[in-house]
Image: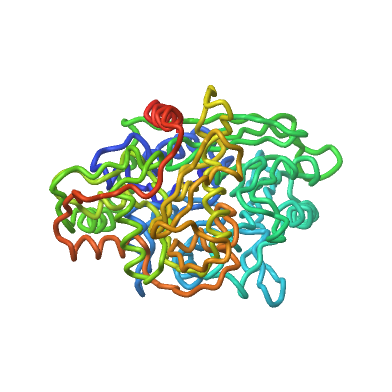
Amino acid sequence: MGTTDIHGQLMPWDYEREEVLDYGLARLAPLVDSIRAAHPGRTLLIDSGDLLQGNPLTAVFTPLAAGEVHPVILAMNHMGYDAAALGNHEFNFGLDHLRRSLADAAFPFLSANTVDADTGEPAWPTHTMVEREVDGRLLQVGITAVVPPGVAIWDRDHVEGRLEFPDMVERLGEVVPVMRAEGADLVLVAAHASFQGTSYDTVTTGLGAESRMADAAWQVEGIDAAFLGHSHRQVADSTINNVLFTQAGSHGRALAVATFHLTPDPEGPGWQVESKRAELVRPTADHLDEVMVELLAPAHERALAAMGRVVARAEEEWSAAEARVEATPIMDWVNRVQQEVTGADLSAAAAFSLTAGFPQGDITVARMARFYPYDNNLLRAVRITGAELRAYLEHSARYFLPCPEARCDRLVNPDWPGFNFDMVRGVDYTLDLTRPWGERVVRLERDGRPVADDDVFTMALNNYRQSGGGAFPAVADAEVVYAGSESVRDLLIEALEREETLTLPTDFEPNWRIVPESLREQALREMQQGRR
């Protein structure tokens, strides 16, 4: 049985919308119990990573205070996990927090491709062997795990010079034979990765691709099954080169269940795999582990109290619905706060959700968590040239597909996530979506003067972007002129507390726009229809 990308969703509760959910780890636990009861002594439970970051429950335990046990570990110990993978988000808050959080786990956390930067030795166990007795015969199951090498980019501040992340296929090619040599009858990979693809430039970074599990199926002999993660997608049952793949999806919405039919090996003491299949089992509102709920009650109450705190009041609604098609007061406010904190000439930010603006009335911490969900983003400022700024905006504009005649079936790029569409404050610019990628910035001015290639600016942005997240040009190698230790979300909350009351500016002047107007309208329609 496998879970993945839980992101702190232990309780069936949405702390940001304040409503009961029909998913979460506490709803999966009864499914695990029932499968164990049906197959006594013949089950394993693993997780494929991204556990410690992602919702208010984990946020209030970051950093983890001395003597505390992380609620995620409490829940997983209660459920009796056999092993878990490190996900990329495990590294978001530094190695000290990570190691303290995992210290109380009653099961091993694994990573075949996380190594000490100085020695090259594994920084965590590469694999574990789990034994079961079946019909009086020993069954040995080898479990290993991999994480995207992109951790070296996304959490560079925490891992640079301390950890390295070799290519996952290369490392699996080394670890899987070791498990087989140790007697593994069955080899499983808890992969915090999908089949293929990468969001960063592997050539310039020198890193292996973000996801390579399809390659692993072809290139690494001896893998029986892989429990995927990272992409948040659901995969019930897929096979590549006789390797079974399954993926539960995110936040405890399903349990991935792989069933193996084994027969005794006629040539030795072990077992042979005769057949295998996988399926997804989904919880309902009737599933709930009441013991886990009681166990987590103190942590849950702590998160509720933190999220319910009122930090300001909005006199009118501040909508984000059109934030990716035109300049809006709410995104201008985010960028203004980033500029004020850093003293930068410019600021870049993305609208993470088009439905999470500020409603009229009280603005709570929960509302801010919906609007700015990434509590691991820190604030940075870099020095860039006018040419680099133009390249940055051109890269961002890939959020929209080419539409040369101003007529196209689809405009919003399905392969370009909304969090990689940045808008920049401090300059005025126009994006012409009829022009090809790389030639869309048809106007770029500062204080009424065209920006020259050799102009120099400082620009505020978050550390994910500055470290290379989204593969935006120039910023990863740019001189850093400001490096704060507070999260952007906390800085925004502090700004709200200072302002106390938000009033829509009557003199707001949009600094960027999309042309032609027909394509701006089409993009907005697609977003409203849920296409992006």
Q: How is the image coloured?
A: rainbow
Report x, y in % for residue 237: 62, 29
Rendered position, 317 above or below 263: below
Left or right of residue 451, residue 12 in this image: left
Name which residue lies at 25% across and 65% down.
494
User: In the image shown, does 122 or 513 lie closer to the viewer?
Assistant: 513
Report x, y in % for residue 468: 57, 59
Name which residue lies at 36% across and 57% down.
58
Report x, y in % for residue 304: 22, 53
User: In the image shown, does 310 or 26 lie closer to the viewer?
Assistant: 310
Give the number of callouts.
0
Rendered position, 517 above or below 379: above
Which residue in the rendered view is the most extreme toward the front? 449
Left or right of residue 465, residue 521 in this image: left
From this viewpoint, is residue 218 visible?
yes
Rendered position, 333 above or below 67: above
Which residue in the rendered view is the most extreme toward the bottom? 118
From this viewpoint, is residue 295 visible?
no
Which residue in the rendered view is the most extreme toward the right? 267
**Quadrant of the image containing the N terminus:** top right
**Quadrant of the image containing the C terminus:** top left
Left or right of residue 171, residue 24 in this image: left
User: In the image shown, does 272 or 148 lie closer to the viewer?
Assistant: 148
Name which residue lies at 53% across and 23% down.
407
Left or right of residue 125, residue 433 in this image: left
Report x, y in % for residue 512: 40, 47
